[in-house]
Amino acid sequence: MNVQPKREGFVEDRKAPEPVNELPPEPVTQSGPPEPVENWPIRVKLLHKPVLNNQGTEIRELTFREPTGGDINRYGNPCRIGLDGEVIIDEQKMMRVIAALSGVLLPRLEQMDPRDWNSCAYRLRNFFLPELAAW
């Protein structure tokens, strides 16, 4: 009998198992609702207090045009991402951007209810953040 001793660290050769017929993987679907496509102009209702437009008429909705790179150049970028990943809104820059995009004078917007101001700021903030898909 010709038996060779096993060497340490090696195992016996084994026959590979027969492949099992598997179903092809199902296509991956996106979880959650699809990203909304923005239709400009964007409208935000002022639910708590109307403001006066430039003609002195009370309005209960602000209409925003699409922001551009020139708006960031003129008024600054109102949003940044902190070290912990939190989105930080610079209130003064955002107020100037809200005024520029809505066409309502800044002194008129300073009379806004804070809840309405936040509704506008949070509605606009994603347009001033980087698009991770571009990286």
Image (cartoon, rainbow, N blue to C red):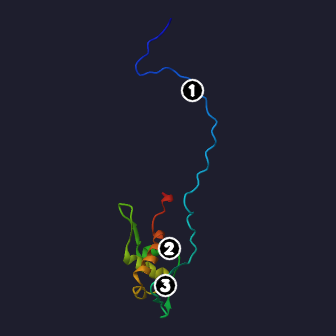
Provide the residue designation for mark 3.
Answer: 103
Horizontally, is 86 left or right of 12 in the view? left
Q: Residue furthest bottom?
A: 56
Provide the residue designation for mark 2.
Answer: 68
In terms of secondary structure, where does tag 1 sit? loop
User: Which marked residue is nearer to the observer: mark 3 or mark 1?
Assistant: 1
Quick one: label 3 or label 2, which is nearer the N terminus? 2
Provide the residue designation for mark 1.
Answer: 16
Instruction: Write the residue at 56% across / 71% down.
Output: 38
Q: CA distance from mark 3 to mark 2?
A: 14 Å
Instruction: Write the residue at 41% across / 76% down.
Output: 94
Q: Viewer-proximal residue, 15 or 101?
A: 15
In terms of secondary structure, where does tag 3 sit? loop
User: Residue type at mark 1?
Assistant: Ala
Residue 109 position in % (x across, y down): 42, 85
Residue 73 position in % (x across, y down): 43, 74
Instruction: Write the residue at 45% across / 66% down.
Output: 129
User: Residue type at mark 3?
Assistant: Gly
